[in-house]
C-alpha cells in the first residue's frame, strides 16, 4: 500500500512539473519529483528511490530543452547518496529531513549543470543566481509534501521498522523469565 | 511485489545505482551527439503529456481571462464610486467586449501576416512551457498531422519566435531564439540599413539576443532593425527578429558586439504561427547555379 501511495505521489509530482510553468513561472522552481525521491530515499527504500529518480528525471527531460537523461542522472546520484546517508545517520526529525532536501536540491542542480557542461552543451550561468530560489521553493513545497506522505505512510512504516529491527531483541526478552518477573 | 530484506536491498542498490547512472549517461551522450531533438522517447512522452497539458492550458487561459476582467472591474469600480449599478453592468460588458476586441485584433494581425506571406502557415496555441527554468522551449498544439516538421520557423505578428525542435503527432516543441542552445543553428542575420551579416545567439535571458561577427567598420545605430538573411537553412529571408538596443563598438580589426531585443514578446506568447517552410536543398541550389553559369557561356 505504501508503494502505491508513493508511486501515486511521484506521478502527481511529474504531472505538476509538466504544467507548473504554464500556470505561474515561480512554481517551476520547486522540484516536486525530487521531493518524492528524497522522501523515498529517507524512508530507506533505496531501490524504489533509484527507480523513481530515473523515471521522473527522464519524464521531465523529455519535455525540456536540456539533455535527455541529465535530470535522471542527477536525481539518481542524489537518491543514492541520500539513501546511503539515511542508512548511517538518524534522519527521522523533520528539520533534518528538510536540511537534507535542501542539500539534495542544490546538489541535483549542480550535477545537472555540470553534466551539460561536461558534454559541451550551452547552459546559462544564471543557474547560480536562481539556485537559492530553487532550494527555497523546493523547501517550501517539501514541508507539506513530507507531512502529507508521513501521515499517509508512517503507521505502516513504524510497524515494519518494529518487526525489522527489534524483533530478535523482543524475542530474547520474552524468553528471559527473570526479566519478566517470574520466579524460577 | 517481492518483499526484500534490508540486507538484500543494501547489497543490490549500489549495482542498481551504477547501472541506472550508466544508462542515463549513455542517453545524455547520445542526445548530445546531434543537434536535432527528435528522439523517440521524447516523442512518446510528449505525446502522452499533451493530454495533460492541453486541458490545463485551456483552464489557465480561461482563469487568467476571468481574473483580468475581475481586476479591471475592481479598478473601474474604485474610480467610479458614484456611478449606478447600471453603469457597472455596462462596464462589465464593455470589459468583456474589450477582451474579445483585443483577441480579435491579435488574430487579425496574425491573419494579415498569414495573407502577406507566400509560405503556408499553421496557427497554433502554446499549451506548455519548458518544465525546467534553465531552457526556453514551448510546446504548441500542432504536430506532424498538421504538416509541421523539425526546424520549421515559428513566428508571431511581432517577429521570429524560434524553430521547431521536436514533432509528435499532435504537438511540437519550439526552441525560442533566446535559448542559449539556439545559437547552435547559426542564425545568420542582416542589419536593416547596411545589410551587414552577423550571427544571432541566445543569451539565456528572455528579452535579449547577441549579434556577433559584424565587421567593426560597419556603422550600426541603436534602433536598427535585424532581419533573417535566409542563409542558415532554417529561416526564410526577411523575417524581422528585433531591434538593436546596445552596441559594444568594434574597430577595423575587431567586430562589433550588438545586443538585440526581439520584437516578438517572448514572455507572454499565447498564439504563434508555424511557417511550413522548407529551405531549398543545397544540391539543388548548386545544380541551379551550375546550370545558370553554363547557360551564360
Image: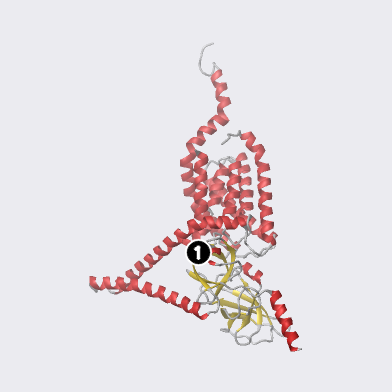
Residue B263 place in picture, x, y as percent:
53, 77
In this rendering, does residue A136 appear at all? no
Depicted A45 relative to depicted B78: above or below: above
Q: Residue at x 60, y 45 (%)?
A: A51
Q: Is residue B101 left or right of residue B248?
A: left
Q: Which residue is mark 1?
A: B141
- Residue ranking furthest to the right: B297
Disc tally is 1
Q: Is residue A53 left or right of residue A150?
A: right
Q: Residue at x 58, y 84 (%)?
A: B224
Residue B245 place in picture, x, y as percent:
57, 80
Q: Secondary structure at mark 1?
A: loop
Nearer to us in this view, B143 or B295:
B295
Quadrant where the N terminus of chain B sits is top right
Quadrant where the C terminus of chain B sits is bottom right
Residue A184 place in picture, x, y as percent:
54, 11
Depicted B59 relative to depicted B13: above or below: below
- Residue ranking furthest to the front: B295
Nearer to us in this view, A133 or B191:
B191
Q: Residue at x 62, y 83 (%)?
A: B191
- Residue ranking furthest to the top: A184
Residue A155 place in picture, x, y as percent:
47, 36
Image coloring type = secondary structure
Amino acid at each position: 500500500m505504501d508503494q502505491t501511495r508513493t508511486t501515486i505521489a511521484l506521478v502527481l509530482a511529474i504531472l505538476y512539473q509538466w504544467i507548473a510553468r504554464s500556470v505561474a513561472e515561480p512554481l517551476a522552481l520547486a522540484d516536486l519529483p525530487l521531493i518524492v525521491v528524497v522522501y523515498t530515499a529517507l524512508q530507506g527504500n533505496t531501490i524504489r528511490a533509484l527507480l523513481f529518480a530515473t523515471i521522473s528525471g527522464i519524464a521531465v527531460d523529455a519535455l525540456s530543452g536540456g539533455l535527455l537523461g541529465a535530470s535522471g542522472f542527477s536525481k539518481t546520484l542524489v537518491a543514492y547518496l541520500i539513501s546511503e546517508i539515511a542508512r548511517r545517520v538518524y534522519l527521522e526529525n523533520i528539520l533534518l529531513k528538510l536540511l537534507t532536501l535542501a542539500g539534495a536540491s542544490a546538489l541535483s542542480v549542480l550535477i545537472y549543470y555540470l553534466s551539460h557542461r561536461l558534454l559541451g552543451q550551452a547552459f546559462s550561468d544564471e543557474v547560480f543566481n536562481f539556485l537559492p530560489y530553487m532550494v527555497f521553493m523546493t523547501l517550501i513545497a517539501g514541508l507539506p509534501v513530507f507531512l502529507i506522505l508521513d501521515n499517509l505512510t508512517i503507521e505502516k512504516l513504524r510497524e515494519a521498522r518494529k518487526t525489522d529491527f527489534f524483533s530478535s531483541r523482543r524475542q530474547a526478552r520474552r524468553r528471559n523469565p527473570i526479566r519478566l518477573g517470574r520466579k524460577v | 511485489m517481492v518483499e526484500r530484506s534490508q540486507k538484500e536491498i543494501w547489497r543490490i542498490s549500489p549495482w542498481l545505482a551504477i547501472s541506472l547512472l550508466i544508462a542515463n549517461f549513455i542517453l545524455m551522450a547520445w542526445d548530445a551527439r546531434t543537434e536535432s531533438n527528435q528522439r523517440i522517447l521524447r516523442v512518446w512522452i510528449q505525446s502522452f503529456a499533451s493530454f495533460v497539458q492541453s486541458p490545463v492550458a485551456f483552464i489557465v487561459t480561461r482563469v487568467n481571462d476571468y481574473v483580468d476582467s475581475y481586476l479591471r472591474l475592481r479598478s473601474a469600480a474604485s474610480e467610479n464610486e458614484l456611478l449606478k449599478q447600471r453603469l457597472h453592468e455596462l462596464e462589465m460588458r464593455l470589459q468583456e467586449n474589450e477582451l474579445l476586441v483585443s483577441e480579435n485584433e491579435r488574430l487579425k494581425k496574425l491573419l494579415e501576416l498569414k495573407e502577406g506571406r507566400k509560405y503556408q502557415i499553421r496557427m497554433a496555441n502554446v499549451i506548455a512551457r519548458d518544465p525546467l527554468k534553465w531552457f526556453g522551449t514551448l510546446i504548441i498544439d500542432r504536430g506532424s498531422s498538421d504538416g509541421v516538421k523539425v526546424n520549421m520557423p515559428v513566428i508571431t505578428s511581432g517577429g521570429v519566435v524560434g524553430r521547431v525542435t521536436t514533432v509528435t503527432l499532435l504537438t511540437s516543441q519550439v526552441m525560442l531564439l533566446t535559448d542559449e542552445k539556439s545559437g547552435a543553428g547559426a542564425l545568420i542575420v542582416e542589419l536593416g540599413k547596411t545589410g551587414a551579416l552577423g550571427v544571432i545567439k541566445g543569451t539565456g535571458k528572455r528579452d535579449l539576443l547577441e549579434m556577433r561577427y559584424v565587421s567593426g567598420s560597419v556603422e550600426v545605430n541603436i534602433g536598427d532593425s535585424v532581419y533573417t538573411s535566409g542563409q542558415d537553412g532554417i529561416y526564410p529571408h526577411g523575417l524581422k527578429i528585433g531591434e538593436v538596443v546596445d552596441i559594444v563598438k568594434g574597430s577595423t580589426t575587431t567586430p562589433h558586439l550588438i545586443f538585440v531585443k526581439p520584437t516578438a514578446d517572448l514572455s507572454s506568447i499565447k498564439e504563434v504561427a508555424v511557417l511550413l517552410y522548407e529551405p531549398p536543398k543545397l544540391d539543388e541550389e548548386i545544380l541551379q547555379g551550375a546550370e545558370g553559369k553554363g547557360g551564360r557561356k
